[in-house]
Amino acid sequence: MDRGNRIMAYFYGTPRNPTTNVAYDLYYMCESIKDFLEGSDWRTDGVATGAGGFNGSAGNYAGTDATSGIYHTISAGYSTATTGYITFYKKHYATGQTAGYTPSYKITINIDTADGWRVNVYDDNGANSTPAAGTNVGIGGTTNASYNRVGGGYGSMLHELHIIANDTTFMMKVTGSDVSGGGTASTRDHGWFVLNDLEYAPTIDNWAYSIDDTYCPSVLVHSAWMNVMDNPVPSETNGNYCHFGVGQPRYIDHNGVVRTSMFNAYNGSYHFGLDITASQQYSTISPPPALNQEHFNVSGGDAPIHQLTPVQFIGQHSLRLAAAASTTTAINKNPRRGRMMNMYRISDNAGNDGDVILEGSTRYRIVKPHKCGYQFGYESDINACYAFPEANVPYV
Amino acid sequence: MALTDAEKLAVRQRHSLHEDSASDQYISDFKVYRYKTDTEYSKANMNIDYIVENFDGSTMGVFSQRSPLEMVTFGISSLKDENNVWVEWTGGTE
């Protein structure tokens, strides 16, 4: 049933062929994601009930519809039997609230043997790719080396996929390996991608959009954490086995010029919020990803209580004396700050991907995308967790 | 005529391209195009499908900028540009 690009907010899928390599698995998976974004029950479509792709009967499809038209121009395809891709556009939730204000981004998800699952965000012209210039870079966004790669060229290399798609947020959490079986607890890799709208600030955003109509006040967060997120031995000694990046793909800098955000996800340090060096300059979020967050043991209640802390965006800045040498990132400072709508940091180790916490009757889905509790991501050893509402939250 | 090192650095900074040649995301070879002067701006002329035939994100890239109205390409030998609004910039004064 096609409901005119109206979608359910939460998707969970696992491969139908978890241990064997089957051609066109990834293409069928992309078709299922397309079904989901187009508002049909992907679990009952032929691509999820046949011999490949996602296992529809084991999947989940929950929540309530996003506003019609937020996700549009959705297409999926493949180039070989071991590849798949899906491309779509996401409008900012406040599109149309002011006449002529219709910011959006184009999102492309690619999957193949060489680079696994990864995501690129383009402006609405299809240019200015972030977080990497090319599509041949793993979801960690640093290089196309194996330590960026989550999953591979067959569905069997995927462990599971979670997606939140509502008016303000497209979030994808992918776990997998580069070998058949989707990896074990000590080898499984976790990739995370979020494109999350900032709270609409009409005075700023209307002005910024008038300067350049590729401007869109949404924030890209991505990460890849290798081997350790499901691992009872939590720390990874390889410094390049984790990556974390944040940025507003297209923004207006402090001099009023449109820019493409700089990302430096390597080591999970530069965007981690506690990299206190003379050249600290990259975008980050608050609560700082590096900080750990304890829960509350509320007596007489449903302890532990997980506080829902709204996540804030901090655009790229310049922690330096004014006379210090300049780099691209520091020159092109982004003054934009703001609330990332419907994205919450919650207590560490609150749960596993897809678990539900409740605030009254409101359901939130948890993901655990990266480690925290230390200045450098690659040495951190506590699972940071985030929560997203399962149902859509419309703003009119 | 070719871009000077100073002009290349300025292009990198305008388009937020990595400056460190040791970076995995460093783009060593790129072309710069500028919108033809006295030509009316059209958003359609900025679209990736207008700029290049069969865009392949694994080998190609386009970064665009409004002030100056300019774009940087890599992995693209020639533009589609049917309206002929883009002129390769080789440095110096326009």
Image: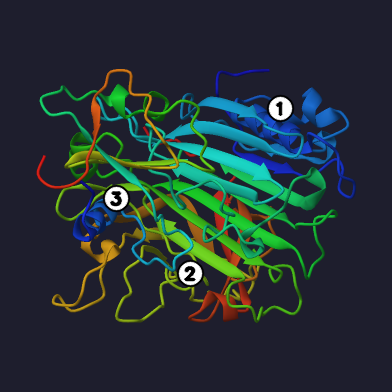
Q: Is residue A376 above or below residue A264?
A: below
CA distance separating discs 3 and 1: 41 Å
Q: Is residue A199 visible?
A: no
The quadrant in which residue B7 appears is bottom left
List x then y, in percent, for residue B13: 26, 57
Find numbered disc 2 in the image and state the secondary structure of the residue it sits on: loop
Give the label on residue A11, or none.
Answer: none
Find numbered disc 3 in the image and state the secondary structure of the residue it sits on: loop
Q: Is residue A2 above or below residue A307?
A: above
Lower position in the chain sequence, tag 2 or tag 1:
1
- Name the residue: 80% across, 31% down: A48
Q: Are marks 3 and 2 on the same chain?
A: no
Q: Residues within 10 Å of mark 1 (few under 14, many from 20)?
A: some
- Report the mark closest to the observer, 3 or 2: 3
Q: Is residue A260 left or right of residue A296?
A: left
Viewer-nearest residue: A385 or A176? A176
Check disc 1 and report the residue beneath it: A41
Q: Is residue A220 visible?
A: yes
Check disc 2 and report the residue beneath it: A289
Check disc 3 and report the residue beneath it: B15
